[in-house]
Image: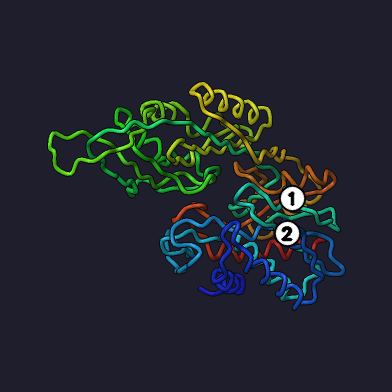
């Protein structure tokens, strides 16, 4: 199935745009905007603001993607499931998050719509573009296109913070053998560390730590990204042998049991639920573990819809790992986008209702949208967020409903007409 938005998305998918490595997309978007007569401004964070005379609103999306599997080389294909046509990428993240939004914005520029568009950089690695934004938005209305459920007008999101744990280790030389074991079973599905955190997706790091808690560890490496649920891991385990054949000197981590105890004891998953919003309130994702010669690093992402809970879990996490003797730091803290109705959410709701009817609802998302940071920078900015049905973002199962893309694009166009 080919539509204009999907056609542009497929073109975009040929341009590498992994976080921190999206320079070709950065250049492409500027070139396209200028060719359609838009004024283009950029800043040192590589954000791009494209403006058109007569605009009354800014559309916003990030142009980087989470690259897992074979990305950025994407082999796209369509699959019909549950009477829906899904676009997927073979053995890779698809990048529909947030590439579908970029495609919509490019198409609107092609059509000459009087609209401002803001392409932000490196959202998937700490919302860096939004955090370092140095461009002045000319409008006080902003429609973010990074939500992932059609018919839901999003007006709030979780805040978040990344935690980095550095645990010093020593090694003891032993004579024997070691065995490397890889974990990548089909049950380790991976997924988004926010919107999928409540689905009880097995975290390979937790399983590895439980299975080998009494083993002597030589090396460990697991997880893919801070904002994805870990699905791959590799451990090298020491074992003594009665045979004198092929024995060698192995540098075993002296604190093996402590490392497994740290991982086993830290709670990965949902901490609390928000019954009013019907979403997860607070969660933690045990994302990555990596051993080096003299240390083991652990990466964790914490999210919450409530700022006090976010700070509390951050403090609790820091104290937990410090009690084991680790050095713990945090980075990229951003506050939640507190749900609040405004003129724009009403307008977007009305436009969505014309397309989706009674399915239309207001909602919030347990993930980090850039709206939270942009709202802190510009308190008078009125914001809302919408997007098509995207499932399993940040994983090789990521897929987008093609028909949903067209329906949401219709909503976007209706919003522009209502301004």
**35 displayed left or right of 21:** right
Q: Which mark is residue 47?
A: 2
Q: Nearer the viewer, residue 403 or 136?
A: 136
Residue 49 x %, y %: 77, 62
Residue 216 x %, y %: 30, 31
Residue 152 x %, y %: 64, 50
CA distance separating discs 2 and 1: 9 Å
Give SS at disc 2.
Answer: loop
The quadrant of the image that shows the C terminus is bottom right
Is mark 2 in CB contact (under 8 Å) with mark 1? yes
Looking at the image, residue 104 lies above or below residue 151 = below
Give SS at disc 1.
Answer: loop
Looking at the image, residue 351 lies above or below residue 363 = below
Q: Which residue is mark 1?
A: 132
Between discs 2 and 1, the one toward the N terminus: 2
Looking at the image, residue 28 lies above or below residue 184 = below
């Amino acid at each position: 199935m080919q539509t204009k938005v999907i056609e542009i998305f497929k073109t975009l998918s040929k341009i590498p745009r992994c976080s921190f490595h999206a320079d070709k997309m950065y250049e492409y978007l500027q070139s396209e905007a200028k060719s359609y007569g838009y004024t283009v401004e950029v800043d040192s964070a590589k954000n791009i603001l494209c403006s058109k005379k007569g605009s009354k609103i800014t559309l916003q999306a990030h142009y980087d993607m989470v690259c897992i599997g074979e990305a950025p080389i994407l082999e796209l294909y369509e699959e019909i499931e549950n009477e829906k046509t899904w676009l997927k990428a073979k053995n890779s993240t698809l990048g529909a998050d947030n590439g579908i939004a970029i495609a919509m914005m490019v198409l609107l520029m092609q059509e000459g719509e009087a609209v401002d568009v803001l392409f932000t950089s490196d959202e998937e690695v700490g919302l860096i573009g939004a955090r370092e934004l140095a461009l002045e938005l000319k409008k006080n209305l902003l429609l973010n296109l990074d939500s992932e459920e059609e018919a839901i007008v999003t007006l709030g999101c979780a805040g978040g913070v990344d935690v980095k744990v550095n645990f010093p280790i020593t090694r003891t030389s032993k004579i024997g053998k070691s065995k490397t074991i890889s974990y990548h079973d089909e049950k380790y599905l991976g997924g988004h560390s926010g919107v999928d955190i409540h689905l009880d997706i097995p975290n390979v790091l937790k399983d590895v730590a439980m299975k080998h808690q009494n083993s002597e560890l030589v090396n460990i490496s697991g997880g893919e990204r801070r904002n994805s649920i870990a699905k791959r891991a590799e451990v090298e385990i020491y074992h003594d042998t009665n045979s004198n054949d092929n024995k060698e000197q192995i540098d075993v981590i002296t604190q093996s049991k402590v490392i497994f105890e740290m991982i086993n004891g830290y709670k990965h998953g949902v901490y609390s639920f928000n019954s009013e919003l019907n979403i997860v309130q607070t969660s933690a994702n045990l994302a990555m573990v990596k051993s080096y010669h003299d240390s083991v690093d652990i990466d964790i992402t914490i999210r919450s819809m409530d700022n006090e809970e976010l700070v509390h879990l951050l403090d609790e996490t820091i104290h937990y790992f410090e009690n084991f003797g680790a050095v713990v730091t945090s980075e990229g803290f951003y506050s939640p986008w507190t749900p609040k109705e405004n003129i724009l959410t009403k307008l977007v709701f009305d436009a969505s209702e014309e397309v989706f009817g009674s399915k239309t609802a207001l909602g919030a998302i347990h993930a980090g949208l850039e709206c939270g940071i942009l709202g802190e920078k510009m308190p008078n900015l009125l914001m809302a967020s919408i997007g098509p049905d995207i499932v399993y973002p940040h994983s090789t199962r990521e897929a987008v409903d093609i028909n949903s893309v067209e329906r949401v694009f219709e909503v976007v166009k209706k919003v522009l007409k209502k301004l």
